[in-house]
Amino acid sequence: ELRTHPVLLGECLGGALYINDFIRLARKAGFIDPRVLERSEVDVNDPELRELLGEARFFSITYRLFKLPGRLEDLCEEYGQVAVY
């Protein structure tokens, strides 16, 4: 089982969430508009682990979460104050 594999757990891959599951959990906890700050794919270079994982891909994602009831819209509207490089 991948979720309980000791090396995958140690590398924070064994208990990884699907992106949309994380977003649902964040919203359920009161963070209405989770915003991605950084995202990068995690390279798995160990051939044995790569074989276990198959085609699965993993990402390290940093979110900014706001808990400001009644002060944020439910969809991110930036109105030009964000730069993407």
Image: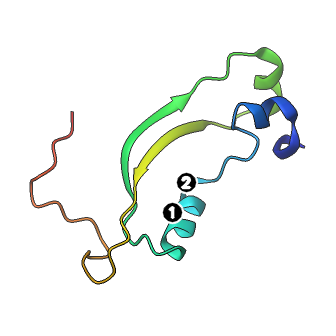
Which quadrant holds residue 52? top right
Name which residue lies at 24% across and 78% down: 71
The reply to whether callout 2 and callout 1 are in contact (CB within 8 Å) is yes
The structure's colour scheme is rainbow
Residue closer to the observer: 45 or 26: 26
Q: Where's the N terminus, which quadrant?
A: top right
Element assignment for label 1: helix
Q: Amino acid at mark 1?
A: Ile
Percent x, y for residue 30? 46, 75
Most extreme residue toward the front is 68
User: Horizontal placement of 42 versus 52: left or right?
Assistant: left
- The label shown at residue 19 is 2
Q: Amino acid at mark 2?
A: Ile
Most extreme residue toward the bottom is 70
Name which residue lies at 82% across and 29% down: 7
Relative vertical location of residue 50 with respect to residue 38 in this rendering, above or below: above
* Alpha-carbon span between mark 2 and mark 1: 6 Å
- The label shown at residue 23 is 1
Which quadrant holds residue 78? bottom left
* Crowd band around label 1 with a 10 angstrom C-alpha radius: few (<14), some (14–19), many (20+): some
* Crowd band around label 2 with a 10 angstrom C-alpha radius: few (<14), some (14–19), many (20+): few
Most extreme residue toward the left is 80
